[in-house]
Image (cartoon, rainbow, N blue to C red):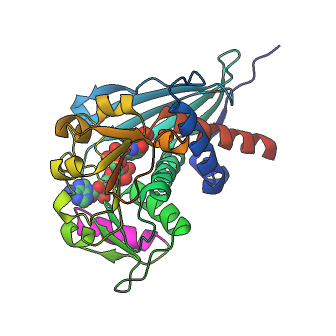
Amino acid sequence: MAREQPVFLTDDVVARFLRYDELIPRLEEVLGKFSLSDSTEVVQPVRFVVPINKHNGYLGLMPAYITHEDTLCTKMVAFYRREGNFTLPSAQATVLLFNPEYGNVKAVMDGSDITHKRTAAVSAISAKLLMPAQSDILCILGCGQQAVSHYEILTQLFSFKEVNNSKVRVCSRRLETAERFAVNVKGPVKIFSSAEEAVRGADLIITVTNSNEPVLFGEWVKPGAHVAAVGACRPDWRELDDVLMRDAVIYVDSKEGAAVESGDIILSGAEVFAELGEVLNGTRPALRNKTTVFKSLGMGIQDAVAAKLVFDKWKSSQ
Ligand SMILES: NC(=O)C1=CN([C@@H]2O[C@H](COP(=O)(O)OP(=O)(O)OC[C@H]3O[C@@H](n4cnc5c(N)ncnc54)[C@H](O)[C@@H]3O)[C@@H](O)[C@H]2O)C=CC1
Ligand SMILES: O=C(O)C1=NCCCC1
């Protein structure tokens, strides 16, 4: 039998088929299974990272196999720490979806939309479980690609109050990035030039910066608030200071990943309380009344469920 050639799904096709309402339950299911102590269902090594020193970047390889869906997948993502007017986004991702029985590639997909949506969706799951029951104010630090997807899903799922003519506070290192963000998103934002002013009083704080030093300080954070910290994905990078890491209850996506990749965890010496998946599968509690941090690093299984969803929907549309 002749082998079928892989299909290439461009970013706009992926974006058309990837919907948050279908993605979120699949992420919840796979994260829950990943965090079961005897899980053999979900196989995912810690990301393998190759430094690209000459260009201040990294290439991350993110394979995963999910038995219950029979999904074999890997994402390759190159990411860069740089500021200024580069023509391309600071992360470039490609996803390969395999036929698990024979190992041939079924689909090659642009991984940008998958990366933006699955990361924001996982932060939204953390917010659903861990932010205060009455959460009025959302603050986003960083105004790049991830800030846009986080704004989209968080304002869709939760109703933040109109405070000073704005539901969402944002602050970025450069004012022009924040202004571009405000034009791009569909909805009101209030731009702050001081991160401290943006953060004080917020119930839900998202850090989506490419900083390698703290941008969020425990002293500014309202007791009981929830922080989803998405940047600082290298062992020597920080977004959060030691005070916040010491005082908050810390959740992560993967304990194994956090111990190797998260500068906020490694350098602060903070203890991890639980994986988000343990809350989802009922083995650890969601301490919503405390100040909580969800340290997100990104996982291959998140890309795998998203890629399978896209491929199945694309296939049935043919
Ligand atoms: N946890 C996860 O699953 C994932 C994490 N990431 C990480 O999330 C971060 C954001 O990703 P993108 O939005 O794609 O990057 P981006 O390069 O599009 O945006 C980064 C933003 O951070 C801002 N920034 C830098 N330093 C700042 C500071 N001190 N205060 C306020 N803003 C500051 C920049 O001005 C820029 O607006 C990156 O670190 C990336 O590596 C990306 C994908 C998945
Ligand atoms: O999970 C991902 O995808 C990424 N994580 C950290 C760095 C950029 C991409």
Q: In this picture, which residue range is highlighted in magenta?
A: 172-185
Query: Is the C terminus in the top left, top right, bottom left or bottom right quadrant?
Result: top right
Identify which residue is drawn at 53% across, 31% down. 34
Front position in the image: 174 or 5: 174
Q: Is residue 39 above or below residue 150?
A: above
Res 224 seen here: yes
Residue 11: x %, y % from top left? 57, 47
Identify which residue is drawn at 46% across, 41% down. 284
Identify which residue is drawn at 35% across, 40% down. 273
Residue 147: x %, y % from top left? 39, 59
Does residue 96 appear left or right of residue 266 in this picture?
A: right
Q: Main secondary structure of the magenta part?
A: helix
Identify which residue is drawn at 34% across, 86% down. 164
Residue 222: x %, y % from top left? 26, 66
Q: Is residue 315 above or below residue 171?
A: above
Q: Is residue 4 above or below residue 272?
A: above
